[in-house]
Image (tube, rainbow, N blue to C red):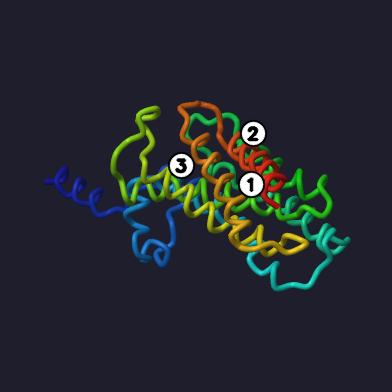
Amino acid sequence: MSRLLSSQNLMKQPLAMPSAGLANPPLPGWLLGLPGVSHLVERLGVTEFRRRLFHMSPALLPIGLPCIQHRDVWGPTLMTILVISAGVALIVAVSLGHLLKRRREENWMHAVLGYMIPVLAPLLFLPGRAELGLMTLQILALGDGSATLGGIMLGGRRLPWNRNKTYSGLFCFAIVGSLAATYSYWGEAHPGIPVATAFAICGMAALCAAIVESLPMRSNDNFRVGATALIVGITMSALVS
């Protein structure tokens, strides 16, 4: 009888959370309540879902930029904001690495720097061509990010050269990346260009980056995707602008 009572008491006691739970807290309820989020978390896992959110969130930064009057070559105010934002992003990425790193991932800083370098390089070293950096940012953030989400939500046939990727993910990358990049490129280009021209430049850059992202390579894809988008964008802008 005493053993039975002891067992019942143990069953009533709350289970102790493992130490990993403290380092990887659950997502807030309001977020899980949004349409489709629970399905994505179930398919991706909490860590990978957080990683996708972190990956896509920088695309919000330049949304209002076309509405702000500023010079062709960014002045000290915008450049200061850029440097501060990059520094804050780097600090946040390092401090939240334990929440965002994949299991057995050892090159977290390589992933962070691979994301930042293709975006910051044209903004810092190509004065008057900020549209190239913003285009690269949108393709990396929203194009690459939507490939994972689209592939999971839509499913479908797998790519013949990479069975871990789907046509739906590839198309989501190309479409979302093209549209988001076109907005930033067209809004920042000086002198102004037609939307169709911006779409031709960004569409080709996003498509090439989507194909590179789909290749069966084990290394982190941030740098090669961003570098591809930037190089193709520079080439296309020279051809059609």
Q: Secondary structure at mark 2?
A: helix
- In the displayed structure, does residue 52 sit left or right of residue 126? left
Q: Earlier in the sequence, mark 3 or mark 1?
A: 3
Residue 12: image quadrant is: bottom left
**Residue pictured at 58% horizontal, 52% vertical:** 200
**Dot 3 lies on which element?**
helix
The label nearer to you, 3 versus 1, is 1
Q: In the image, what residue type sits under mark 2? A: His
Q: Residues within 10 Å of mark 2 (few under 14, many from 20)?
A: some
- According to the image, label 1 marks what residue? 93
Locate residue 203, reporting x and y percent.
Answer: 55, 50
Residue at the spot 56% in from the left edge and 32% down from the top edge: 220
Task: Check disc 2 and report the residue beneath it.
Answer: 110
Q: Nearer the viewer, residue 160 or 192?
A: 192
Question: Mark 2 or mark 3: which comes first in sequence?
Answer: 3
Vertical side of 140 occupied by 188: above or below: below
Q: Is there any visible trace of residue 54 in the rendered image?
A: no
Q: How many marks?
A: 3
- Along the viewing direction, whichever of 30 and 204 lies nearer the viewer: 204
Of mark 1 and mark 2, the one earlier in the sequence is 1
Residue 20's label in the rendered image is 3
95 or 52, which lies in front? Answer: 52
* Disc 1 to disc 2, C-alpha distance: 11 Å
Residue at mark 3 to residue at mark 1: CA–CA distance:
19 Å
Q: Secondary structure at mark 1?
A: helix
